[in-house]
Image: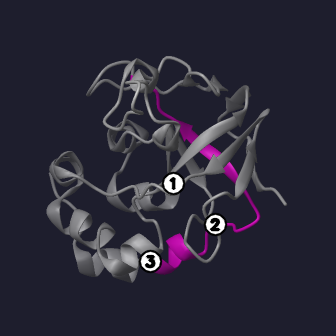
Amino acid sequence: MSFITKEEFVERLDYVKAAPKEEGSLKLIVVRPVSNEREMPASCSLSVEEGVAGDHWAKGCWKSLPDGSPDPAVQIAMMNYRVLELIADSDERRALAGDALCVDFDLCDENLSTGDRLRIGETEVEVTDVPHNGCAKFAERFGKEALAYINSAEGKALHLRGIYVKVVSDGVVSVGDAVKRLG
């Protein structure tokens, strides 16, 4: 399997930067029932208590509160679908990134800040302050050069690996729903 090089990534970066800034769309939903398992439903429920219905976040995750419950600040990983298009050639491969909401929307620092809210389908989510960085699994699935670039200063400012959001209003989201910045 071949992976994207840093040079190829940089050459195609204008495509990622051209993502919608005010209103985009939800392109892919990924649910992780257990570690390393993926489902791609056409729609799902999002809730303050459980995050993405069926996702393992509510059963415990890498970041917990003092009482042991999962930290809402890492409730849902959201990634720009355009980045996924650069690093993977199918939705089955894109789902391996593990981001629950894959959107055609600009997630960069200049467009979104901690506390900003987005409406997706029937629900509302809020950007959290926890950085979303690539890890060893990401390098294994998409290549070391992709990981290095995503985790570079430029990659982090553009949030190429994505962001974390938490649910503030329960509802259903479906592939194709608009992603709108609020306020």
Residue 13 rendering spot, x and y as whole percentages: 44, 77
Image quarter (top left, top right, bottom left or bottom right) of the C terminus? bottom right
Q: Taking 30 as reference, is 20 above or below it?
A: below
Query: According to the image, label 1 marks what residue?
Result: 81
Tell me if 129 is positioned left or right of 135 in this view.
right
Mark whose residue sits in front, 2 or 3: 2
**Residue visible at 37% across and 36% down in the picture:** 92
21 within the magenta span: yes
**Front in this rendered view, residue 44 or 47:** 47
Tell me if 163 is positioned left or right of 172 in this view.
left
Work out which residue is located at the far front of the displayed protein and give it: 66
Q: Which mark is residue 112?
A: 2
Query: According to the image, label 3 marks what residue?
Result: 13
The stretch of residues the image draws in magenta is: 13-32
Query: For the residue marked with disc 3, what is the amino acid?
Result: Leu
**Residue visible at 42% across and 76% down in the picture:** 12
Residue 129 rendering spot, x and y as whole percentages: 51, 57
